Image (tube, rainbow, N blue to C red):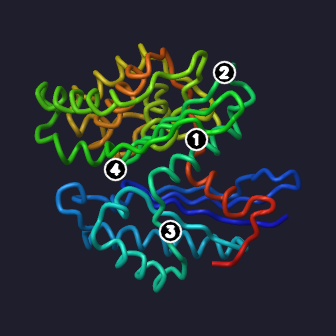
């Protein structure tokens, strides 16, 4: 079976997927990895990728690309999202990635990011949804919303410049968050999400990316992350309310010790939880399904799915 890889370079983390393309066109994972490198640190304020963030990200990118090649990947698709889009020196990062990792990084627009995330969710959840699918993809720098029609096509998509890293850097100065800081984040999110159109009747909301999967892992106290247990899970609105209150009230050291929470994500998880909570509230829904498969899966299918052709990176 042909084998391909995708690497998703986000504001907060870098994710690798190496997968075999099955005869029916679906992909079966061989290896999945994730590392938090915080490429987007300081981008909201300075509009520049920091040398530390670039170096950490490039080191992981080199390791991931080499592993994909060693595993026999015929092609490697690499995308970068919010931080690289916003930074004035994004081209410097792309050049360094080509020189050091031997890969071409595509900085994709928010609308394409939304489309690829939706494609990954539709593959896994489309058959069980009683109505249209809604997808919320919470990243470090941006959050994408995608509404799918009953026919499975995208009816609405938009990328908002609110993410767990961006909002933490913009609003949080105390440990734990002060009531004023939390209130400022909530007010900003409610104003931002007021632009969302009402969801169609009987819609199912699915959340993707690290914030959502982490919240589910913390809710279920997973000492060891279990992707199969997380994928397809559900977070109710009541669970989200209680979990968000808890995360916002805990100091950083206590958050770092929580089962299910990567210590490197502990500083931004309160803002991430607030984004998901306010998204569910804005949409008027009572629950959010959880997907462990996001942009990297959509990117893989887009670049290397049956009929798309392939090329070695």
- What residue does disc 2 label? 131
N-terminal label among 1 and 3: 3
Tell me the distance, in whole angstroms, between the alpha carbons under discs 4 and 3: 17 Å
| Residue drawn at 78 percent across, 50 percent down | 26
Q: Are marks 3 and 2 in contact (CB under 8 Å)?
A: no
Q: Position of residue 234 (x, y in %)?
A: 55, 23
For discs 1 and 2, the disc positioned in front in the rendered view = 2
Q: Position of residue 143 (x, y in %)?
A: 40, 42
- What residue does disc 1 label? 292
137 shown above or below 16:
above
N-terminal label among 1 and 2: 2
Mark 3 nearby-residue class (10 Å; few <14, some 14–19, many ≥20): some
Element class at badge 1? loop
For discs 1 and 3, the disc positioned in front in the rendered view = 3
| Residue drawn at 51 percent across, 72 percent down | 63
Element class at badge 3? strand
- What residue does disc 4 label? 141
- What residue does disc 3 label? 106
Quadrant the C terminus occupies? bottom right
213 shown above or below 97:
above
Element class at badge 4? loop
How many marks overall?
4
- Please tell me in which quadrant of the rendered image residue 133 appears: top right
């Amino acid at each position: 079976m042909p084998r391909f890889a995708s690497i998703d370079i986000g504001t907060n983390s870098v994710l690798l997927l190496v997968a075999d393309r099955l005869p029916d066109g679906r992909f079966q994972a061989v290896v999945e990895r994730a590392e938090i490198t915080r490429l987007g640190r300081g981008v909201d304020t300075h509009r520049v990728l920091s040398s530390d963030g670039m170096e950490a990200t490039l080191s992981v990118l080199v390791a991931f690309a080499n592993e994909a090649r060693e595993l026999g990947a015929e092609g490697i698709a690499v995308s970068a999202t919010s931080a690289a889009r916003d930074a004035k020196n994004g081209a410097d990062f792309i050049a360094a990635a080509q020189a050091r990792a031997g890969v071409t990084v595509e900085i994709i627009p928010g609308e394409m990011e939304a489309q690829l995330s939706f494609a990954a969710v539709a593959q896994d959840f489309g058959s069980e949804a009683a109505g249209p699918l809604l997808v919320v993809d919470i990243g470090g720098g941006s959050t994408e919303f995608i509404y799918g029609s009953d026919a499975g096509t995208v009816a609405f998509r938009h990328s908002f410049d609110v993410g767990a890293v961006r909002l933490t850097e913009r609003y949080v100065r105390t440990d734990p968050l002060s009531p004023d800081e939390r209130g400022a984040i909530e007010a900003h999110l409610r104003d931002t999400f007021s632009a969302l159109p009402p969801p169609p009747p009987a819609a199912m909301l699915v959340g993707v990316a690290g914030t959502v999967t982490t919240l589910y892992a913390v809710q279920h106290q997973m000492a060891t992350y279990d992707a199969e247990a997380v994928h397809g899970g559900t977070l109710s609105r009541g669970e989200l309310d209680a979990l968000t209150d808890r995360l916002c009230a805990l100091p950083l050291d206590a958050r770092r010790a929580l089962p299910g929470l990567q210590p490197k994500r502990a500083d931004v998880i309160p803002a991430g939880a607030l984004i998901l909570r306010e998204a569910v509230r804005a949409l008027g829904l009572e629950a959010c399904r959880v997907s462990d498969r996001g942009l990297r899966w959509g990117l893989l299918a887009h670049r290397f799915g049956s009929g798309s052709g392939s090329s070695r990176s």
